[in-house]
Amino acid sequence: MFYLTDSQIMEFVGRYLWPLFRISAVFMTMPILGTRIVAARIRIVLAFSLTILIVPLLPPMPAVPPLSLGSLVIIVQQLIIGITIGFFLQVVFQIFVLAGQFMAMKMGLGFAAMNDPASGVSVTVLSQYYMILTTLLFLSMNGHLVVFQMLVESFTTMPISATGISADVFLQIATSGSWMFSRALLIALPVLTSLLVVNLAFGVMSRAAPQMNVFAVGFPITLVFGLIIIWFSMPSFFPNYQRFMDEGFNVLYNILRIP
């Protein structure tokens, strides 16, 4: 008969336990899969399935008992690595949400807010539109498969051990906020500059004809002009999307030391 010793069972559990924590942390924090739209049970099933598939491809695990203090340190490190990957992907996606916020505030659509079912917070309609467009482009270009591939390669470049991400990486992620704001401003800049010219024109008109109600006339015209400018600027959205996604993934590759 075939018998399994306690040490063999513990080794088997540890081999699947530590990768599961890193993969689960990514699935719980990354865009699309980490939102409220996807049920927690589905995320857990996906994490278990991916773990079972990739564990035979991973390098040898450290010889640490799964039920020990050293194993707890390894689990914490895997959770930190997974949360870091998912959080930075969220930063990349928030570029387009923030660009929509900039344009909506300038157009006078700041009051047209709705509850985002993915994050549970209130965002403008224009931000929701850009978020849906970004999600569809991400899935259509197999961005989720790129994330899975990067996650599998991270186990080779950053193997499972008690040492995880250095302090320099956390500083780099903290300074990524300025990168997010600058890229969002680049997307919204054509609309912002065009509406600035429109507002200057209304300022001149109000001085030439003080009896004209600028607020009653200017709001619908600004809104219509903003929508037209967004429509004409859509051909440049896809190149910007590709460039910003490439920049974001290159930063993640550097964080995970993937060549």
Image (cartoon, rainbow, N blue to C red):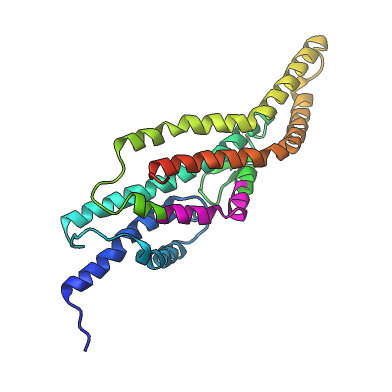
Quadrant of the image for the C terminus?
top left
Quadrant of the image for the N terminus?
bottom left
**Is residue 142 shown to the viewer in this render?**
yes
Q: Quick check: 50 above or below 5?
A: above
Depth check: give the residue in front, 219 or 226.
226
Q: Position of residue 59 (x, y in %)?
A: 31, 59
Magenta region includes residue 143: yes
Residue sitting at x 46%, y 55%: 149
> Is 35 positioned to the left or the right of 136 in the image?
left
> Is 60 positioned to the left or the right of 126 in the image?
left
> Is 234 positioned to the left or the right of 19 in the image?
right
Residue sitting at x 46%, y 65%: 42
What secondary structure predominates along the stretch shown in magenta?
Answer: helix
First to last magenta residue range: 134-152
Q: Position of residue 229 (x, y in %)?
A: 75, 33
Residue sitting at x 33%, y 47%: 80
Which of the 4 image quarters holds residue 44?
bottom left
**Is residue 28 shown to the viewer in this render?**
no
Furthest residue toward top = 208
